[in-house]
Amino acid sequence: MGKKVALTGNEAAAHAMRQINPDVIAAFPITPSTPIPQGVAQFIADGKMDTEFVTVESEHSAMSACVGAAAAGGRVMTATSANGLALMWEILYIASGSRLPIVTAIAARALSGPLNIHGDHSDVMGIRDAGWIEIAAENSQETYDGLIQAIKIAENKDVMTPATVFFDGFDISHSIEIWEMEEDKKVKDFIGEYTPLYPLLNTKEPVTHGAWAPPDWYFEHRMNQLEGLLNAKEVVKQVGKEFGKEFGREYGLFEEYKMDDAEYVIVAMGSVCGTTKDAIDSLRAQGVKAGLLKVRLFRPFPYQEIAELLSNAKAVAVLDRVSPAGAQGGPLFTEVRSALYDVNNRPPVVDYTYGLGGRDTQPKHIKSVYEALMQIVNTGKVEKQFDCLNLRGTWG
Amino acid sequence: MADKLLNWNEVLIGATIKDPGNSKNYETGSWRVEKPIWNPDTCINCMFCWVYCPDSAIKVDEKGNMAGIDYDHCKGCGICVEQCPSKPKSLAMILEANAKNKTEEDLRKELFSK
Ligand code: SF4
Ligand code: SF4
């Protein structure tokens, strides 16, 4: 059993980093993730960790320094948000293409413009094709647990792929929750020592990282990289189980909340899942068979498992905390809908954009989604495939 | 060149290269438009050209002296000519088209005998 603490999501991430005690952290401050590197710097100043903390002039440099340190053979972490993550974008591909298991904590935030510093998933969805493992955390506990597991997942020999654990900016990053912190030694033992595959600092076996791959090589390397990312799915399950055995909180690819007999299902990621569970509880009390499929692993996307689970539902609503940006729906919607194409019993699937730029999403908004699903089932008609939650004015 | 083009599941993780220095095996000087010609008669062996050449295409002998140009890798950028400090310059550029079928000796005469 861990020790119960009352700390913010950012503090949960900083404590995970303290216990992981990576060789290098290179980070640049950006709201709402700033308290993470700030907390880490304090831990180092207080002698509670001995990580080499590299202060840099931008997030582009932060991720570049992470790539260098990881190629050298170090265990490496960083943290960022929003435009900072966007500035890292170019180097994210170099990290994944070079198979460097860097772990990044992301306090998910809206992208400008207009300028906004509050929570949504614009940043993490913008990097969904960068070849990183993406793990969504609902709350502080999952942020802390997820970062510890991410180290083990990313560094697995069959994976060797960078990973990010994201949690909602402000909703989680700045909210104080009660969660369990494990003992330093237990965490250290759980993650184990890291043995890099081809460290640059091993002068006995000199290697080249970041070489040029012409048209007759690049394709093969990219597909080799994809295999590592796809391997992460099984490793996420395995590490989630091991974590459960060690600390009593087991994790999988997703969490099913009242899904066994659920007819009306919401698929979502992040802190809105807490609100959704609340709404489900009150709907269940009224006899409505509502359920939630909380996606934890967004990349690689476990489409088969998700399709199988959803094929029993009567109607499905996906919640995307990002604008569809010209697609048929948000990224989670298009993934879920595409996954369902292969199953025989395809329930109708609708999409909602919610919570952009920190817009509040309350139980009544979630209830309105379930009501819309019930109406779809009752009338057999989908009036609106896409809608918005808590937007002023009627959309579409 | 690598011995064989490998399949996607045979390549080394992260496009890592375990036999460093293998760029030596790749001839990359074929797309040069101009080529530098070296005149050993006026060369003062300052080795500036060796320092500045972005392609490590200046050859060095065992004594550490300038020993000519590695045309398998020289890209013809002309940086070596620009920075050569000897008077007159000991390096000069000529269009590949105009250097065709001429010996090193011919080219030296043509470029440096004025
Ligand atoms: S820079 Fe000119 S003088 Fe100096 S070594 Fe090279 S060719 Fe000779
Ligand atoms: S022309 Fe450029 S590449 Fe060729 S030897 Fe001179 S400096 Fe090097």
Image (spheres, rainbow, N blue to C red):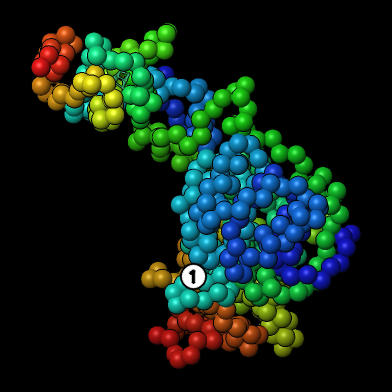
In the image, A134 versus B30, the foreground residue is B30
Would you place residue A228 above or below residue B91 in this image? below
**Image location of residue A100, percent across then percent down:** 58, 42
Label 1: element kind: loop
**Image location of residue A263, percent across then percent down:** 63, 76
**Outermost front residue:** B87
Mark 1 CB near ligand 2 (8 Å cut): no
Report which quarter residue A121 is drawn in: bottom right
- Left or right: A374 as drawn, with respect to A331: right
Would you place residue A257 above or below residue A76 in this image? below
In the image, A158 versus A35, the foreground residue is A35
Q: Residue at x 77, y 73 (%)?
A: A177
Report which quarter residue A207 is drawn in: top right
Q: Residue at x 87, y 60 (%)?
A: A2
Using the rendered image of the protein, determine whether residue A319 is visible from the camera's viewpoint: no
Would you place residue A21 above or below residue A112 in this image? above
Q: Residue at x 58, y 38 (%)?
A: A71
Quarter occupied by the C terminus of chain B: top left
**Image location of residue A196, percent across then percent down:** 65, 35
Q: Amino acid at mark 1?
A: Leu
Would you place residue B89 above or below residue A177 in this image? above
Residue indicated by mark 1:
A111
Badge 1 density bin: few <14, some 14–19, many ≥20, Cα 10 Å = many
